Amino acid sequence: MKFVCIECDEPMKFAKNDGLDDDGSLSVNFICPSCEWGVTLLTNPQETQMVRSLGVKIGGSTVPPKPMEMLQTHLAGQRTGSQEVAEQEPASGSACPFSALVQDVYQEAEAPAALLWSAEATERLQRVPEFIRPMARKGIETFAREQGVAEITPNVMEAAREHMGM
Amino acid sequence: MPKRYRDITGDGGSNVAGQVSAQAERLKARMAGVRHAIAVMSGKGGVGKSAITANLAAYFAREGWRVGVVDADINGPSIAKMLGVRGHSLSLDAGGVFPALGPLDIRVISMDLFLKEDQTPVVWDGPQAETFVWRGTMEMHTLREFLADVHWGELDILLIDLPPGTDRLATLNDLLPDLHGSVVVTIPSAVSQLIVSKSITMARDLLRTPVIGLVENMTAYVCPTCGTTHPLFAPTPQAETLTGVPLLGRVPFDPRMALAGDKGVPFILEDAASPAAQALAQVGEGVLNFVNSGSPVS
């Protein structure tokens, strides 16, 4: 989606957003860099969602998407076990006014990024008694986030265990 | 002359076209390890596509082939149950998700493996009014991720179980233009044949993808006591005559086949000597001949 100032015949630039409304609609302002004439783009919730459903990294990306990223990011009611597959990539900088804005507002609205669990770490977690497994998982993930670790490995689990004095 | 869309290079930074191209490249790279990708389809629902898929997978696995199955029915997934992998906990590494392993190490991916409970439907985060605007796009990209983001490894055959709908093969063909062919499942009813014929036209004449052959499912009821067969439907013209597509086999209805599916065991493995299992093996043999020769079944 591109906007052109009729008077100046110049591509318009993103100026500011008024954020995502409760229903998912957006309000976005654009300004002509030459004459500073402005327009506001209003999208309905379906139009906003349509951009998200294209399976692309809105706002651009310098790294490839994570496996099953779109499914994991957008599917409601997922199995706890399948959370192992989830990870959401941090937003990268973008000059695209509309798509970058959609990305930004959803970044604000969504939960913190899920962490990647390696196959070895997943297997090791399965050996934890079931009744304390959720607590162990939460503790390990909290530790990993504090340490800025993106992927849980057996080494991270060991460090978390020592950190928690277990 | 005022500027038009094409006069402005780029899209301001998202590079959506580049990302879509990268998606296609990623899918192509993953599929490089797959010798044959075959769709199992039917325009009509309830004709037994998934049961045929599960048993075809078992046939090829029994032949020593490395087999993968994609359950492309995003909203009504049944392959995970039929291949006994429900409840499997998925894991991943940076390169992809590891598929569940079914009987004879059949590799399986299905939306069922992602849903929380039996009753959980597929619901996407987003505005819940007028979801038709974007829901189909979500489903297509989910199928793309099933194909591109799973550690399929080296496969001799990948079977893709399509949901009902004459448009489904077109979607798959957009993702996998090198699809090797499709198996069409029908039942001997006029209604089914009417709809299935549209799917065949779509596949053969519009998409120009090879139709390997027809499977006529539930052709007759086999009495488990005396072994005699009784028709389940009123006589109809031969499906292969109507459609011009070769017949791979006629699979009789056997209640034990449904029970085996419920248990997660392909019937072809459970009772190989039964008429239904033998018919399924004949279907498998037809597909095998096709993929080995690269030409339609005659």
Image (spheres, coloured by chain):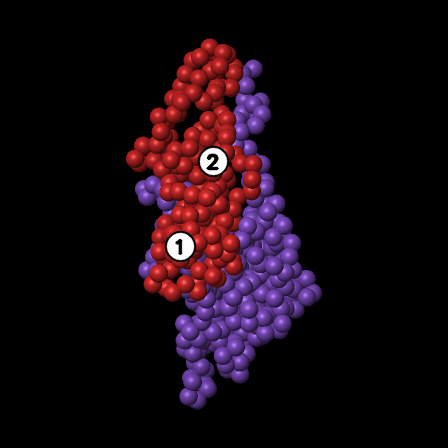
Chain colours: A red, B purple
- Quadrant in the picture for residue A17: top left
Q: Is residue B274 above or below residue B31?
A: below
Crowd rating for badge 1 (residues with CA inside 10 Å; few <14, some 14–19, many 20+): few
Q: Which chain letter goes with mark 2?
A: A
The residue at the point 58 percent across, 65 percent down is B67
- Quadrant in the picture for residue B46: bottom left
Residue indicated by mark 1: A165
Q: Which chain letter goes with mark 1?
A: A
**Most foreground residue, B265 or B97:** B97
Q: Is residue A28 above or below residue B45?
A: above
Disc tally is 2
The residue at the point 41 percent across, 75 percent down is B259
Disc with the residue nearer the chain's start (2 vs 1) = 2
Query: Which element carries disc 1, helix, strand or loop?
Result: loop
Horizontal placement of B246 versus A28: left or right?
right
x then y, percent, for residue B88: 45, 64
Question: Mark 2: which amino acid?
Answer: Ala
Question: Mark 1: which amino acid?
Answer: Gly
